[in-house]
Amino acid sequence: MPRALITGITGQDGQYLAEFLHGRGYDVFGVVPGQANPRADALQEEMPFVEVLGADLQDLSSLIAAVEYSQPDEVYNLGAISFVPLSFRQPELTANVTGLGVLRMLEAIRVVGGRDNPIRFYQASSSEMFGKVRESPQNESTPFYPRSPYGVAKVFGHQITVNYREAYGLYAVSGILFNHESPRRGLEFVTRKITNSVARIKVEIQEELVLGNLEARRDWGYAEDYVRAMWMMLQQAEPDDYVIATGESHSVEEFVERAFTAAGIDDWRRFVRVDPRFLRPSDVDTLIGDPSKARRVLGWEPTVSFDDLVRLMVERDLGAERERLRSLAR
Ligand code: NAP
Ligand code: F7E
């Protein structure tokens, strides 16, 4: 059985990746930080096949112990402070976890793996590295111009991964993933905030949806498609970096409009208010990825369209809200 170690296993991507790898016969080990992490309990209940290891991206010795114990064929580094507004409020923490955490994971692999290191490493790089974009669409050679402490930390993680590949011959790749969403997306991110609020407005337990920058444009895909791409990258003969995106860009406003429409509400403007509290000190205005290398080399294709993504997230949130109300009434 192949063995995989995942950091960030309690997050959106970690959960989908754990299920995907388990389905392919992997033994799955997951790094979870904290001494009584409530997300670890939820994970164990939903995915008893995962072996949870207590470790933290801020603590090299705990990562070395996790690699020694799990003896992985593949390591997926998905752990991060991933919410951009938090990175403005806690930039040092973000640099430590999202940036230096990558270096620590690479060091753990280098030290434990020894000379003829067979461990394959995946780094979760991000389209946020393109920030104030230098060209459109963005591909693997587009220069980086990050616009947040999160984006800056991801550039460090990306470049240190390239450096360990070149300096030590590690099999290390970075997937430059554009935004990807799902019903498992955290409620703090704009797509899930919208679909969850639309569902609550529909069942009349919430009155309004308060947002920030409605004009920002993103290339939004579906998370399950994107974790499949991570695995595909590690199955190639040679390690390389890939952009994963749909090649389509939509505004936050378009997402809002489609979400209300999916819930059968036409006059969305009645329910939406803009509050400067949700604006960022500097934002990424527009992103659109060029996934042609992933198409050509990996044979990867996204399977869920923008409309279907919005619809599936609204339907899932609406179903959950209705079920919650039913159980309260029982
Ligand atoms: P997510 O849902 O926010 O999950 C982040 C994970 O990181 C959580 O499991 C969290 O654990 C863990 N984590 C936080 N601090 C940690 C620490 N000190 N040590 C170990 N683990 C720690 O993120 P996601 O959306 O699944 O994204 C996965 C990765 O891809 C992240 O690196 C993100 O930056 C990157 N990325 C995401 C997207 C996207 O659109 N989703 C696009 C490009 C790149 P707890 O919550 O249990 O503490
Ligand atoms: O914001 C605007 C906001 O927080 C998208 C992370 O997974 O993807 C994610 O980062 C846009 C921004 O995602 C609200 O200003 C408007 O322009 O959903 P988001 P993000 O910042 O793009 C990348 C690829 C990652 O790597 C990150 O880890 O939406 N926006 N109003 C809002 N955003 C939020 N969160 N909340 C609002 O009320």
Image: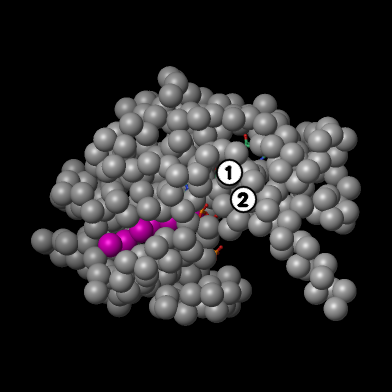
Quadrant containing the N terminus in the rendered view: bottom left
Return the mark for residue 312.
2
Q: How many marks?
A: 2
- Residue drawn at the location 32% of the way across and 27% of the way down: 141
Q: What scheme was used to colour the molecule?
A: one colour
Q: Residue at x 11, y 61 (%)?
A: 115
Q: Name the residue under label 1.
A: 308
Residue 261: x, y in percent? 74, 39
**From the viewer's perspective, is 32 left or right of 295?**
right
Give the quadrant of residue 36.
bottom right
Choose between 163 and 78: the one closer to the eye.
Answer: 78
**Could you tell me residue 158's position as x and y percent?**
35, 42
Range drawn in magenta: 74-80
- Gap in Å between the C-alphas at discs 2 and 1? 6 Å
Q: Position of residue 84 (x, y in %)?
A: 59, 43
Residue visible at 66% across and 57% down in the picture: 316
Amino acid bearing label 2: Leu
